[in-house]
Image (tube, helix red, strand yellow):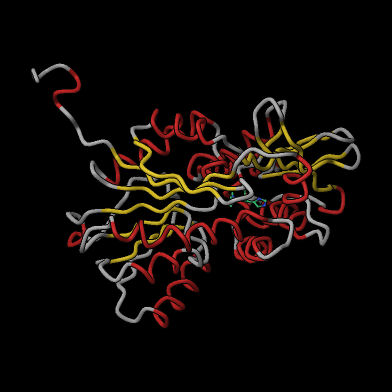
Amino acid sequence: MLDLVEAVAARREASDPDAATVLRGLSAPQKSLPSHLFYDARGSALFEEITRLEEYYPTRVETAILDEAAPQIASRTPQGAVLVEYGSGSSRKTEILLERLPQLAAYAPIDVSRSALEEAKARLARRFPSLRVEPTLGDFAAPLRLPADLAMRPRLGFFPGSTIGNFTTPEARDLLGRMAAGLGAGARLVIGADLLKDPSILIPAYDDAQGVTAAFNLNMLERINREFGADFDRSRFRHEARFNEAEGRVEMHLVSLRAQRVVVLGRMFSFTAGETIHTENSAKYSMRGFHRLAASAGWTPKRTWIDRAGLFSVHELAAEVQDFAADGRVER
Ligand code: AVJ
C-alpha cells in the first residue's frame, strides 16, 4: 500500500514541477512552500481583500503614484504597442494606464489564476470595448508568447505591486533579465517596488487586525491538502509576519503550534512545536538598491516616482539597445 502511494508520489513529482517544489521545500531544514501557490481562486479573492485593508498601504499608494505618472508613461508609449502585464491579478491598476493608452494594439495579461484572468477580461471588455485582450494563463517567468500578428509590435511591460519582492536577489535579476529579453531591446518596463521603512509600518501591513493576511497564509495549507493529497490541520498552525533586517525583507511563516506529523503526497513530514514553514519573502528596496538591481539585469532606469511619505516607488526602465560601440568591437 505504501509502495503504491510512494509510486504515485514519484510519478506526480516527475511530471508536476509544483509537486517536486512542495516536497523539496518541506524536506529542507527550514521548511518552505512557494508563494505562487497562494493564488488559487480563494487565495486570489483574499489577496484582493488585503489590497483594500487600511494597513496594506502598497496598493493604495502605488495606485496614487500611477495616477500621476500615467500621462508621462503614455506620452512615451509608441502607437500600436502591446502592454504586457506580469501577474495581472484583477488588472485594477492597469485600468489607470489603459485609460491613457488609446494607442495600444493589445493588452496581454499573464497570471497563474484562471478566475482572476477571466474576471479581468470580462470587466475590461465592458469598460474598454475596443481593446484587444490576449490573456496567458501561467507563470510569468516563462518565455513570452504573443499571437503572431503582435510579435513585431513595440512592447511596454507592466509589473506593479512590488511582486518583484517575492524573489531573492539572484532570482529577481534572472526574472528581470528574462523580461528584458522577452520584451526586446528598446522596450520599457513600468515596475513597482516597495521601499524600506520602519517595521512598525511594515509588520501591520502583513499582519492586519482583521486577520485577512492570516487567512491568506493559512489558505495555502488547504490548497496543499486538496491538490497534493495532504492532511494539514490548519488549526494547528498560526500566521506570523517577521521583518528580516539583514535581508531587508518581510517574511511570512506558518508556525506549528505543537509537535505533529503531516502526510503530503504519501510522504511523512515531522514538525516540532514552534517550527515554521516559510511561505513568502517580500523584499523592500532603497531607490539606489532597486536601480542597481535593474541595471544588473540590463535595464536603464529612466524615471522614478515616489509618494510624499516615501512609502513606495514606481520606476520606468528601458531595455538597453545593443550598442556595438560599447563593447569595443567598433571604433567610435
Ligand atoms: C502581491 C507579492 C506584492 O508581498 O506585498 C500581501 C503579497 N503577501 N500580503 C506582497 C502579499 C501578504 C504581496 N505581493
Depth check: 213 or 81 in front? 81
Where 93 sits versus 24, above or below?
Answer: below
Q: Is residue 122 above or below residue 105?
A: below
Task: Reply above or below: 249 against 91.
Answer: above
Q: Quadrant of residue 6?
A: top right
Residue name at image x 48 percent, y 55 percent: 87
Residue 299 x, y percent position in the rendering: 35, 36
Depth check, front residue: 121 or 138:
121
Estimate the x, y position of residue 197 in percent, counting from the top left: 68, 39
Residue found at x 62% / y 33%: 24
Residue nearest the observer in this picture, 20 or 6: 20
Residue 191: give x, y in percent of width and height.
45, 48
Image quadrant where one finds the C terminus: top left
Q: Residue at x 20, y 63 (%)?
A: 79
What number of labels is visible? 0
**Quarter of the image where one finds residue 27:** top right
Specify whether 274 is left or right of 132: right
Q: Position of residue 306 (x, y in %)?
A: 53, 48
Viewed as shown, does residue 32 lie left or right of 327?
A: right
Q: Residue furthest left?
A: 331
For the N terminus, the image quarter is top right
Q: Is residue 26 left or right of residue 208?
A: left
